[in-house]
Image: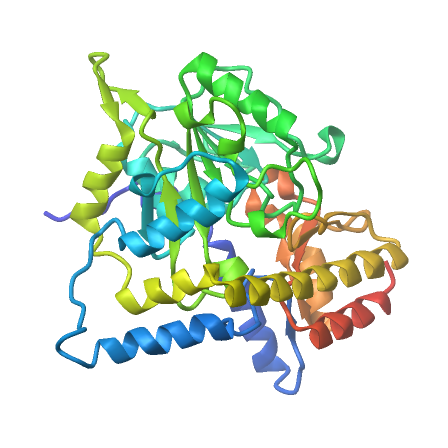
Amino acid sequence: MVTVNENYLLLKSSYIFSEINRRVEDFQRKNPDADVIRMGIGDVTRPLPSAVVEAFHRAVDEMAHEETFMGYGPEQGYPFLREAIAENDYASRGVEVSPEEIFISDGAKCDTGNIQEIFGQDNVVAVTDPVYPVYVESNVMAGRAGPADETGRYSGLVYIPCTEENGFIPALPEEKVDLIYLCYPNNPTGTALTEKQLAEWVDYARDSGSIILFDAAYEAYIQEDGIPHSIYEVEGAREVAVEFRSFSKNAGFTGTRCAFTVVPEELEVPDSQGRMHSLKELWNRRQTTKFNGVSYPVQRAAEAVYTPEGQREIRESIDYYMENARIIRESLESAGLRYYGGVNAPYIWIKTPEGMDSWQFFDMLLNEAEVVGTPGSGFGPSGEGYFRLTAFNSLKNTVRAMERISELSF
């Protein structure tokens, strides 16, 4: 008889953003005239840059003519986009990444969730806590995590707390781990690692034979010097790190879907007999089997991100969102709430008022201010007592939301 993959039954509760939507929909049914401002899910609000839209239109027009029609493309991505990425995102910063090491995909979320498939079941996985849920839940589904305890921690995972006490900087694991998920600038805390701090992780991975899965989806928001935009800015990282990037948060591709993953040639992994295998070749095999590639018009649109016009428009959007972040930070400070982040990332991590847990604070903001954020507990046990706001709404809505929050009594 057919049976279910019982690893799915180990997943705790529902995916956090599904639960947020459920609560908001319930509130709006009961309050149909409510003017809810969403500052929870990290979806952008500004439109695609005009340079991107124009390239998109041109590519769609090409699809209408026999002589320029494009069918199946290379699963790894078209060379024109991979070359543009290698030149503009890496070579321009003095970083060595070849087009052949770049794999175009439909989202960093997909790639960070799928990458675990090519590693053995007995690998020990380490995640920072709080953490982007996909890193945890994809490994739960794969059978690496084991059951969860009453705090929500899975027995098979190694959690690295990031708290006020350690400045949200993860400490190196005391035990041996194999796969390490790092996201910096960080979602959800909005904090960042310096080059020295990231180098400690690279050295750890080189010494222990671990691999770092480095999510750099928010690198375009870095404002301060000394914060690496790529893990490959750190010496030795090509031997131990896979990097994930996305066009979603810098260029507005959340609905258009385009991202990429870098797997260096040097990165090798042993099998159970100690024989070494190219991780790049294994990832290529996975992608060619399970993925048909991103559409030609979308890749042409992504290529336009690197034109002078595209870069100018993207910088305007990032500046727009970071102005929202400044408004949020200053409003929270005036309201007497402690917060972190919002300087090198579009996320602001709020310490909830004393005596109030994450979901209680969520319900308070929803019911009393009609503002939606994200409870920190949804990002892991160390997220309890915190709350995430994003800077991705409009300036008008950001100002209105912060005015409402400022009127509350904490």
Front residue of 321/31: it is: 321
Residue lying furthest bottom? 33
Q: Is residue 169 above or below residue 394?
A: above
Quarter of the image holding residue 42? Answer: bottom right
The picture places residue 319, in percent across and down from the top left corner, at 68, 62
Q: In this view, does 186 lie above or below 35?
A: above
Q: Is residue 50 above or below residue 252?
A: below
> Residue at horizontal 72%, vertical 64%?
324
- The answer to whether one can see residue 153 in this image is no
Q: How many labels does the image show?
A: 0
> Residue at horizontal 46%, vertical 26%?
237
Q: Is residue 187 left or right of residue 105?
A: right
The picture places residue 159, in percent across and down from the top left corner, at 53, 29
The picture places residue 333, in percent across and down from the top left corner, at 86, 54
The picture places residue 351, in percent across and down from the top left corner, at 76, 47
Residue lying furthest left? 1
> Residue at horizontal 66%, vertical 31%?
169
Q: Is residue 372 left or right of residue 334?
A: left
The C terminus lies in quadrant: bottom right
- The answer to whether one can see residue 116 in this image is yes
Front residue of 240/68: it is: 68
Quarter of the image holding residue 46? Answer: bottom right
Front residue of 344/392: it is: 344
> Residue at horizontal 35%, vertical 39%?
98
Colouring: rainbow
